[in-house]
Image (cartoon, rainbow, N blue to C red):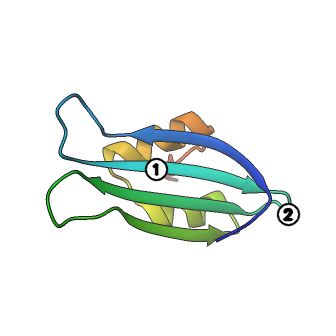
Amino acid sequence: MRFEGVQIAEVSSQSEGSQRWTVLRLFRTIGGRFIAVEEGHSVMAHEHTKYKADICETSEEVVNALGYGRLAKALYRAADINIAEEIQ
């Protein structure tokens, strides 16, 4: 995938001694879209890095793509994306 834009946030679950970890990155294209990237890393034998990327029009689509897990919530905080739901 190739696009023009800037990375606006990155978070990782990697810790010392990790054999598997996830990295989430969020980019903003020059056209205003978001690119939400999930990388699954491993140093285990016969495993390789897995990549997933979603092109999103809105921050709501970013949340739909990455979900509500701990790491995703950390990315939203870093990117200043509010995921609170208003209840009336």
* Residue, disc 2: 31
Vertical arrangement, residue 30 with respect to residue 83, above or below = below
**Farthest right residue in view:** 31
How many marks can you see? 2
Q: Position of residue 42 (x, y in %)?
A: 24, 54
Residue in the foreground of this view, choosing between 30 and 16: 16
Q: Position of residue 37 (x, y in %)?
A: 52, 59
Q: Secondary structure at mark 1?
A: strand
Vertical arrangement, residue 3 with respect to residue 20, above or below = below
* Mark 2 and mark 1: Cα distance apart in space: 21 Å
Q: Position of residue 4 (x, y in %)?
A: 80, 59
**Is 3 positioned to the left or the right of 75 in the image?**
right
Q: Which residue is found at the position 70% from the left and 68% from the top?
A: 2
Residue in the foreground of this view, choosing between 51 and 86: 51
Q: Secondary structure at mark 2?
A: loop
Say what amino acid the circle numbered 1 marks: Leu
Q: Residues within 10 Å of mark 2 (few under 14, many from 20)?
A: few
Q: Position of residue 16 (x, y in %)?
A: 22, 28
Q: Which residue is found at the position 49% from the left and 42% from the top?
A: 75
Q: Residues within 10 Å of mark 1 (few under 14, many from 20)?
A: many
Q: Which mark is residue 6?
A: none
Disc 2 or 1, which lies upstream in sequence?
1
Residue in the foreground of this view, choosing between 63 and 22: 22
Image quadrant where one finds the N terminus? bottom right
**Is 17 positioned to the left or the right of 57 in the image?**
left
Q: Which residue is found at the position 52% from the left and 36% from the top?
A: 77
Say what amino acid the circle numbered 2 marks: Gly
Q: Which residue is found at the position 52% from the left and 43% from the top?
A: 76
* Residue, disc 1: 24
